[in-house]
Image: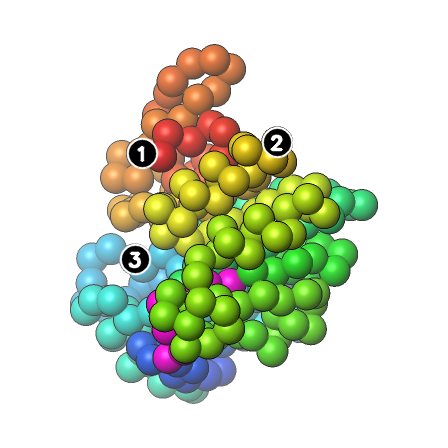
Amino acid sequence: MKYDVRQLPLISNEEIARGIFDMRLRYEQDDLPAECGQFAHVYVPGKTLRRPISVCDASDGVLRLVYQVKGGGTKLMSEMKAGGTVDVLVPLGHGFEIKKDRRYCLVGGGIGVPPMLYTAKQCDKPVIITGFRDKSLVILQEELAAEGETLLCTDDGSAGRKGFVTDLLREKIADTDEVCACGPTPMLKAVAAVCSEFSKPCQVSLEERMGCGVGACLVCAVKVRKNGEEIMQHVCKNGPVFNAEEVFF
């Protein structure tokens, strides 16, 4: 899919949980800006590098980017006001490959949960497992529930069940054809291990620091297995989604 720099009108930019913001941008409805699992590279005035943000949704002329304030760039993003425009490079990367007539289990951890919403909309009644550190960080539960069966857990048990996403995955994996996951690397490694144990295919969306976002620099290079060889590929261009068995965790 061809990517472009777009000046998109900012509809809203609201805090939906502690330090987590929901940015909504307007686009022409006949110009769908992304596939599930792809990301946008957002220009923040005053910063040299863009900020890569997973696409949470792209429906009905609205592009949603749900992000967490982690540093100066995302702090400036959180201060952008409705009525202005946002400079966005989109769509970028290789997203999830969703096939028809397959039962999917989608697993999201923390800020890896937002891309699961758009992915769920491409599946037929998926199981959606989400995990957070505590209840103050829980997001998107009602919208996810509209797309399939949802299971929630938190590290401390303050919302949903106490435990990890892999605990819930083990309960559902027997009835699953394929797993798609996004979240921190330790979580992805654990999810991939469960899928390997039960011989289930698994796609994982990797998180890496990025520079250009289009494969021209080497900032986001990772080692993967391809055709029996160990090679380096770019998360921004060849990913962020890879088959789990290809990834060196």
Residue 202 visible at all? yes
Q: Earlier in the sequence, mark 3 or mark 1?
A: 3
Q: Which residue is mark 3?
A: 50
Question: Tag 3, which secondary structure?
Answer: loop
Q: Earlier in the sequence, mark 2 or mark 1?
A: 2
Q: Which residues are magenta?
A: 130-136
Q: Quadrant of residue 83?
A: bottom left
Residue flagged by tag 2: what amino acid is it? Ser
Q: Which residue is mark 2?
A: 199
What residue is rendered at 38% in x and 18% in y? 230
Whether residues under marks 2 and 1 lie with C-beta atoms below 8 angstroms apart, the answer is: no
Q: Quadrant of the N terminus?
A: top right
Q: Nearer the viewer, residue 168 or 23?
A: 168
x, y percent for residue 89: 42, 56
Question: Tag 2, which secondary structure?
Answer: loop
Q: Nearer the viewer, residue 170 or 4?
A: 170
Q: Is residue 135 magenta?
A: yes
What residue is rendered at 36% in x and 70% in y? 156
Q: Which residue is mark 1?
A: 221
Q: Nearer the viewer, residue 17 or 220?
A: 17
What residue is rendered at 42% in x and 72% in y? 157
